[in-house]
Image (cartoon, rainbow, N blue to C red):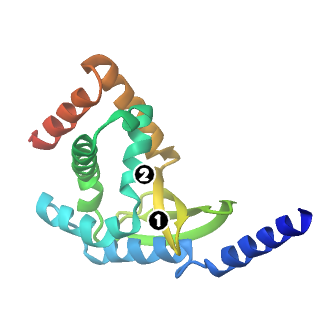
Amino acid sequence: MNRLLCLLLAAFLSVAALAKPAQSADAVVTTMTEQVLAQGALTDAVSIKALVESAVMPHVDFRAMTARAVGPRWRTANEDQRARLMAGFEALLIRTYAGALSEAGGARFRLKRSAAVDASTTEVWSDVTVRGGREPIALNYRLALQDDRWKIVDVSVLGVWMVATYQTQFARVMERSGGIDGLIQELEARSKAP
């Protein structure tokens, strides 16, 4: 029996060793951020959405991010509700960060360091300096290894983790409005507001 366990463990470790990421976590963040900053200042929602979808979303596990932001009630949502939650959350993030993207012209990115949280999670610390000589903005990422690719699962701006912040806000909305459908309505209303 011990010999069988040893063989299974050896096989598992061999497979795990083969699952090397195609690109390092810090390279994913650097490439993505430089793509965004190369676009310069964007002010219209259509251009910002196109940039987010082409340069950012391929590097994000948005389903996992939305599920964590929604919290335990995500498990009770059907696929249509989940799709609407993800669309509403994406629209909310684009609106929230549109101001930051409008100031991206001339911004400089600096990778500070990265460190493994565990075998499949890494945090990457960076900052972005915007024009005008203001203090750099701390921008940190948490990435999870999925198959052979690093995917962003959370972002921290100035020390505030996005998923935890939205999880608190979404819990209040669901408490006040009766659950998942109330949150969907709130997200959709926010995305249509001027």
Instruction: State whether residue 182 is above or below residue 113.
Output: above
Q: Quadrant of the C terminus?
A: top left
Judging from the image, what secondary structure is the residue with disc 1 in?
Answer: strand
The residue under label 1 is: 151
Q: Are marks 1 and 2 in contact (CB under 8 Å)?
A: yes
Q: How many marks?
A: 2
Rendering coords of residue 67 (x, y %): 40, 44
Q: Name the kind of residue labelled 1 in the image.
A: Lys
Q: Nearer the viewer, residue 176 or 135?
A: 176
Classify residue 168 as left or right of residue 146: left
- Name the residue located 40 percent from the left edge and 68 percent from the top edge: 59
The residue under label 2 is: 64
Instruction: State whether residue 66 is above or below residue 185.
Output: below
Q: Which mark is residue 168?
A: none
Classify residue 168 as left or right of residue 145: left
Q: Name the kind of residue labelled 2 in the image.
A: Ala
Q: Nearer the viewer, residue 166 or 126?
A: 166
- Quarter of the image for residue 163 reads top left
- Name the residue located 36 percent from the left edge and 33 percent from the top edge: 76
Classify residue 105 as left or right of residue 15: left
Q: Residues within 10 Å of mark 2 (few under 14, many from 20)?
A: some
* Farthest front residue in view: 1
Rendering coords of residue 139 (x, y %): 48, 58
- Structural distance between the alpha carbons of marks 1 and 2: 10 Å
Rendering coords of residue 176 (x, y %): 29, 17
Judging from the image, what secondary structure is the residue with disc 2 in?
Answer: helix
